[in-house]
Image (tube, coloured by chain):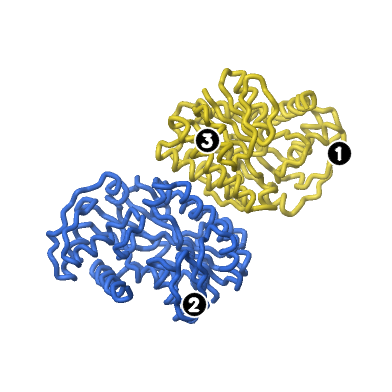
Chain colours: A blue, B yellow
């Protein structure tokens, strides 16, 4: 397949491009900076630039994976700038993909931020969308747009709602959920860490490997898709202190180096994720990590690989 | 109240501005062309122009009524152009309104196009949004955005889903539902008219007077608003042939001058609106026209006034 990947130089994009190329796909890697990758066509530029989009889709499009985004924290700091990427460029991108292919599969990196802060006792596929963050509203709006384009047979879209993904590199990401990755680096490195959420805070997590498997699955999934074209990815629900002790056990370090000083905003956004029943995603063949232990082991492995690759 | 009205020179905007000024409000009338109106501040320009928005909101904002839009037919012909007005400019406008006031009421002209074509046997407040038109998707996306801004206490929004509104002037409007108004002009003027929907087509209608009353009500409504900030306006459901005979009876003309040649697209979009139970709107005090006779009489009166003023 001819697959265009945006955000191709990011935490998810880089290994995804490698994996898709290894699987034999013709990959176009689009980002503001992209490292050369054997067998991959690189397009350097901003997705908000129509000329860049034209270039990226010049060879046609069997599928696209749209990862580029202005994430939660960055979008709060600059809502108008976030709108240009998350809404305007994303809509233009969807139109370019539709024009370049015959109803191409369009995999959109949505987010559990569409649910907002005031969550019911259980979240499932019927939970209404009540985004609170600018970022979450943007994701919900694009889900609606892609469902419409799918209804019109312009695209064949699937919006995957990502939970927290670990472990991102230690660099600033603009993500409000960055602490979920930072704690991996700190505990593994035997460094003191102050958790910005309470010990009993619960959230939904997925390893990078599980996310890559989900995207790869979504690209070729040949099943009746839900009318609204959304899938909340099945994720593990972990307590913050459980995450800390599991990392410490795997890394052979001391979990007592972590203390807890909940930040009001982060605790409100991430402190109390209820049980998640992602039946629709499970039925479509999407899988969470096998256990907290497996998730932590995989995430620590990702960090080790990041250090090697630089 | 200091009220900014966009689309102020339109079919709804012009009489709305007059009415609000008569009620003693300080009105800013914003449109690409605006006729002078005593006691009304006029801002001429495009809502996609940030400088124009700055000018319109320079005096503050207690409330805004956002009517400007690229309607259904025009949006299908130019989706990217429609996006710039219906999404980009509308989001910028909402941010400008939020910045100019203390949680101003923001009345948004949404549309029943958010429901799409494949309607269930009854439409009510729980009917899922499945837009099919570009225009309907844009409206659904902005509803989501305004609900988020309301949740964040930046705005106090209310999205009113308008049904077909009669009778618009005979000029081209870019609206797919233009035939609902055109039939008034033809039957009243004793001219032959070919209906682009079947005689038994059913749709939801509201007179301009009822819409103006709804907007005025929405501006000052002091009640607990629904979490998603949407109200489907209660509307009358009429059959096309019932509409024709009612107009003819009021106008004293011959309904046999209308024949029926359903257009595939219009029949799909407007041919089979099921019963509408707008309980939420009724509970909030929104009212449909009293009867088909009252609706037609009011619409004919609107046409007579347009001829005098126009």
Q: Where is residue A220 drawn, in percent x and y?
A: 50, 73
Instruction: Name above or below for residue B178 compared with residue A33.
Output: above
* Towards the viewer: B199 or B12: B12
Q: Where is residue A256 drawn, in percent x and y?
A: 12, 59
Residue at mark 1 to residue at mark 3: CA–CA distance? 37 Å
- In the picture of the structure, the residue carrying the numbered disc 1 is B256
Q: Where is residue A304 drawn, in percent x and y?
A: 27, 73
Quick check: A30 left or right of B268?
Answer: left
Q: Residue at x 61, y 53 (%)?
A: B132
Instruction: Name above or below for residue A20 compared with residue B243.
Output: below
Give the foreground label among 3 and 2. Answer: 2
Residue at mark 3 to residue at mark 2: CA–CA distance? 56 Å
- In the picture of the structure, the residue carrying the numbered disc 2 is A40
| Rendered-image quadrant of the C terminus of chain A | bottom left
- Label of residue B279 in the image: 3
Quick check: A173 left or right of A105?
Answer: left
């Amino acid at each position: 397949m001819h697959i265009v990947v945006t955000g191709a130089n990011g935490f998810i994009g880089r290994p995804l491009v490698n994996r898709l190329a290894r699987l034999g796909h013709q990959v176009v890697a689009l980002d503001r900076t992209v490292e050369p990758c054997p067998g991959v066509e690189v397009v350097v530029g901003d997705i908000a630039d129509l000329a860049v989009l034209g270039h990226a889709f010049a060879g046609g499009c069997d599928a696209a994976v749209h990862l580029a985004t202005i994430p939660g924290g960055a979008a709060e700091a600059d809502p108008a700038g976030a709108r240009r990427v998350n809404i305007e460029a994303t809509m233009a991108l969807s139109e370019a993909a539709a024009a370049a292919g015959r109803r191409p599969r369009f995999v959109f990196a949505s987010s559990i931020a569409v649910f907002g802060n005031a969550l019911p006792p259980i979240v499932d596929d019927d939970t209404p969308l009540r985004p609170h963050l600018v970022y979450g509203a943007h994701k919900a709006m694009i889900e609606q747009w892609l469902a419409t384009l799918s209804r019109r047979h312009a695209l064949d879209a699937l919006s995957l709602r990502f939970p927290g993904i670990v472990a991102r590199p230690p660099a600033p990401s603009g993500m409000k959920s960055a602490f979920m990755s930072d704690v991996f680096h700190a505990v593994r490195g035997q460094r003191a860490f102050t958790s910005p959420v309470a010990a009993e805070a619960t959230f939904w997590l997925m390893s990078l490997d599980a996310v890559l498997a989900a995207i790869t699955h979504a690209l070729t999934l040949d099943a009746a898709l839900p009318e609204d074209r959304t899938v909340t990815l099945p994720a593990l629900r972990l307590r913050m202190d459980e995450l800390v002790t599991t990392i410490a056990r795997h890394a052979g370090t001391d979990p007592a180096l972590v203390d807890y000083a909940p930040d009001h905003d982060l605790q409100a956004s991430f402190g109390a994720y209820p049980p998640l029943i992602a039946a629709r995603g499970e039925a479509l063949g999407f899988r969470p990590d096998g256990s907290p232990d497996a998730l932590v082991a995989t995430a620590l492995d990702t960090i080790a690989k990041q250090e090697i690759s630089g």
